[in-house]
Amino acid sequence: MPFKTSCLSGCGATIEGESPEEVGVLLMEHMEDAHNTPVDPLEVSEFAIEVNRTGPMMTTS
């Protein structure tokens, strides 16, 4: 998945999605379910970083 972020409470959960907006919604759901903490999905979507799918041992050809 091309975007990800980690839990804001530091529980070690990694949230992944196809867009920053999807990551924001999934992080909002995680924070509510796991930590009973409301967050704004639009705000937290800004924490999503793009994942590089090609690592040091991978090629694009």
Image (cartoon, rainbow, N blue to C red):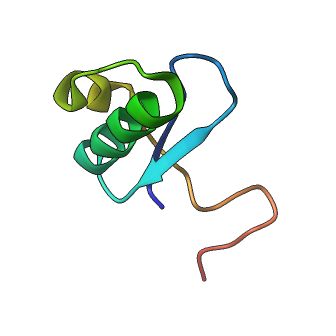
Number of numbered discs on residues: 0
Residue 15 screen position, x and y as percent: 51, 44
Residue 41 screen position, x and y as percent: 23, 31
Give the answer, above or below, for where 39 lies relative to 42: above
Between 37 and 17, the residue placed more toward the observer is 37
Q: Residue at x 18, y 29 (%)?
A: 42
Q: Quadrant of the C terminus?
A: bottom right
Between 52 and 36, the residue placed more toward the observer is 36
- Quadrant of residue 13 in the image? top right
Q: Residue at x 39, y 18 (%)?
A: 37
Between 36 and 16, the residue placed more toward the observer is 36
Name the residue at the right extreme.
Answer: 57
Give the answer, above or below, for where 11 lies relative to 2: above
- Quadrant of residue 10 in the image? top right
Residue 44 screen position, x and y as percent: 31, 25
**Residue 35 as seen in the image, left or right of residue 54:** left
Give the answer, above or below, for where 58 lies relative to 33: below
Give the answer, above or below, for where 48 lies relative to 4: above
- Quadrant of residue 39 in the image? top left
**Residue 27 as seen in the image, left or right of residue 41:** right
